[in-house]
């Protein structure tokens, strides 16, 4: 399957315009704490409508990754960090409401923190996971076909972990599968990665295509890591959208994302001719 070009940008007009000149089919907005203010949400709405005016209908809003210099964690303790909990909930609710209004998607990360941090909030890991799934259930009920959940390298919500995978399947969640996160969780094992992607493909509606060496979060261009893209592309859901979530040297220049698309297109074209 040949993926369409999917690019990511902040809500900055300079970044958005730079991406639009390459005519992406899929557009993902990276949001931050400032986008969740009243003025920020108004600006975000204007930027989504602006992108839609170019004929782009497949738009994803990425829930802010951070709040007050720490992770915007679904598992945040309402008792130990009430301000963090309030931000996490109110931002997710505001984005879901906006997504329903404009007929776009919201992506919520299932977890960021390491196991120790999550355990410190709840005393034990099983309880923390129960809290995460209860909150994801709430977001799913609120958002319906406008919300999806992304895997992490955190054991709080990591595809590749069969317990998590069984639970997300049982809950009928719509999923975003970050390929590099799965690869890192599985310690660089391509065979296990392909099995995980295939298992979750029926519920996966969006992919983050990004390479990795499989050891830690490195967000590499496709072809610069160890992921077997030929095998991966055979098992992803062909109906899902995707973007290239690559670290950029310059946030106003999407060249690493576009180079990844060119690499994948060339790889798949070569594969088809052999």
Image: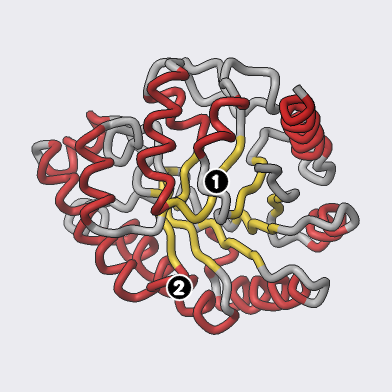
Kindly give the residue lying farthest to the right in the view shown. 21
Q: Nearer the viewer, residue 255 or 30?
A: 255
Query: Dot 1 surroundings within 10 Å: few (below 14), some, or many (20 or more)?
Result: many
**Quarter where residue 137 is shown:** bottom left
Is 165 situated left or right of 61 in this image?
A: left
Residue visible at 28% across and 33% down in the picture = 155
Residue 78, horizontal then vertical, whole percent: 21, 59
Q: Earlier in the sequence, mark 1 or mark 2?
A: 2
Residue at x-position 10% and y-position 37%:
124
Q: Is residue 168 left or right of residue 22?
A: left
Q: Nearer the viewer, residue 173 or 221?
A: 173
Q: Which mark is residue 241?
A: none
Nearer to me, 243 or 97: 243
| Residue 113, x across and y down, in percent | 34, 36
Instruction: Name the quadrant of the N terminus.
Output: top right
Which residue is painted at 9% across and 39% down in the image?
A: 123
Q: Residue at x 38, y 70 (%)?
A: 90
> Where 160 falls versus 3 (above or below)?
above
Q: Which percent across, then down, holds residue 14?
A: 84, 57
**As drawn, 225 above or below 121:** above
Q: Which residue is mark 1?
A: 207
List the residue tagged with mark 2.
96
Q: Quadrant of residue 273?
A: top right
């Amino acid at each position: 399957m040949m993926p369409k070009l999917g690019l990511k940008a902040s809500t900055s007009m300079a970044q958005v315009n730079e991406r639009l000149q390459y005519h992406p089919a899929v557009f993902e907005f990276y949001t931050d704490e400032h986008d969740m203010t009243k003025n920020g949400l108004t600006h975000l709405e204007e930027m989504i409508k602006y992108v839609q005016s170019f004929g782009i209908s497949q738009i994803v809003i990425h829930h802010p990754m951070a709040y007050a210099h720490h992770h915007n964690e679904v598992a945040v303790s309402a008792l130990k960090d009430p301000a963090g909990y309030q931000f996490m909930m109110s931002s997710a609710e505001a984005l879901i409401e906006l997504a329903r209004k404009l007929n776009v998607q919201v992506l919520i990360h299932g977890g960021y923190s390491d196991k120790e941090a999550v355990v410190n909030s709840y005393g034990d890991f099983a309880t923390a996971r129960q809290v995460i799934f209860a909150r994801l259930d709430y977001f799913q009920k609120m958002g319906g076909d406008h919300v999806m959940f992304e895997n992490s390298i955190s054991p709080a919500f990591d595809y590749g972990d069969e317990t998590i995978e069984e639970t997300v399947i049982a809950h009928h969640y719509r999923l975003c599968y970050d390929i590099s996160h799965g690869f890192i969780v599985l310690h660089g094992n391509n065979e296990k990665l392909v099995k995980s992607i295939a298992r979750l493909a029926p519920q996966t509606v969006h992919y983050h295509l990004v390479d990795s060496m499989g050891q830690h979060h490195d967000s590499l261009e496709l072809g610069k890591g160890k992921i077997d893209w030929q095998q991966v592309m055979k098992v992803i859901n062909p109906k899902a959208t995707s973007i290239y979530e690559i670290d950029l040297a310059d946030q106003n220049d999407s060249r690493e994302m576009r180079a990844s698309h060119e690499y994948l297109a060339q790889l798949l074209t070569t594969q088809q001719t052999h």
